[in-house]
Structures are given as structure tokens and as C-alpha cells.
Image (cartoon, grey):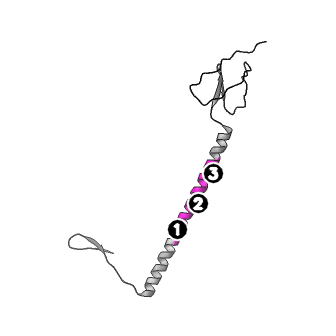
Amino acid sequence: MAVRQDRGQLFTMNQTFLFFEQRTRDAEQAAIDAAAKAKAETKRKEESEKLSRRLAREEAYRRKHPPGHAQCGINWYPAGSGWTHCHACGQPLIYTTDPNAKPQECKGRRL
């Protein structure tokens, strides 16, 4: 309970307890602290599991969708598409992650 003094300062009332009352209060506080610690540990564990699941999802996505692309003439091939050669001219594709890379020159099929 807070009581105001005449000067407007706030102070709290201190009360001394008998040893068995203090022991009871200490036990209650220890139970509250243990519950808070268990809750914090559970939350930390859930966050850790959530992070590991997210990282696993990202890794699976990266395996399926590697970065980069290849371009032969006007034909564009995303990395991970399975194409190794240009379907129009048959020359091998060169995959890159450079967005400013010049495309290969597509020569077209010769019969």
C-alpha cells in the first residue's frame, strides 16, 4: 500500500513477518518464480523449434529453386528447371546469378 507524505513523495509501508509467515511468503514467491521460469523455457523451446522448421522449409525451397538463370537468345531458363541445352539451337546453357549477364546467341537449329 502506498501512502503520500506531506511533501508529495511516495513511499511504501514495510512490514516485518514472523519466521513462519516469511517462510510461507518465500515458498509462494518461489512457486511463482518457478512457474515463470518454466513458461519462459517453454516459450524459448517453441521459438527454437519454430526457427528450425522455418530454416528447413527455406532449405527445401532453395534445393527446389536454386538461384540463377540461363538465357539463350530470347529463351529464358530458370535454374533448377532441368534444361541443360537450349531447346531451339541445342547449345549447352550457361547458368548465372548475374542479372546483367549477356544472353548467349541462339543460332537456331540447322537441318
Q: Which residues are magenta?
A: 34-56
Dot 1, crowdedness within 10 Å: few (<14), some or many (≥20)? few
**Circle 2 residue:** 45
Q: Is residue 41 left or right of residue 65?
A: left
Amino acid type for the residue under numbered disc 1 = Lys
- Left or right, 69 with respect to 2, comes to right
The image quadrant of residue 10 is bottom left
Which percent across, then down, holds residue 76?
65, 25
Label 3 packing within 10 angstroms: few (<14), some (14-19), many (20+): few
Dot 3 or dot 2, earlier in sequence = 2
Establish if 41 lies above or below 91: below
Quote the CA–CA distance across marks 3 and 2.
12 Å
Residue marked by disc 3? 53
Residue at image location 60% in from the left, 21% down from the top: 102
Q: Is residue 67 above or below residue 107?
A: below
- 74 in the magenta segment: no
Q: Any magenta on residue 44? A: yes
Asked if the residue at tag 1 contacts the one at tag 3, i.e. Cβ–Cβ closer than 8 Å, the answer is no
Indicate the amino acid at tag 2: Lys
Disc marking residue 37: 1
Horizontal arrangement in the rendering, residue 95 relative to residue 33 (left or right): right
Cα distance between the residues tagged 3 and 1: 24 Å
Q: Which mark is residue 13?
A: none
Give the image quarter of residue 83.
Answer: top right
- Quarter occupied by the N terminus: bottom left
The residue drawn where x is 36% and y is 83% is: 16
Secondary structure mainly formed by the magenta segment: helix
Q: Secondary structure at mark 2?
A: helix
Q: Is residue 51 above or below residue 78?
A: below
Residue 78, horizontal then vertical, whole percent: 66, 30
Which of the marked residues, 1 or 2, is nearer the chain's N terminus?
A: 1
The residue under the point 49% across, 75% down is 30
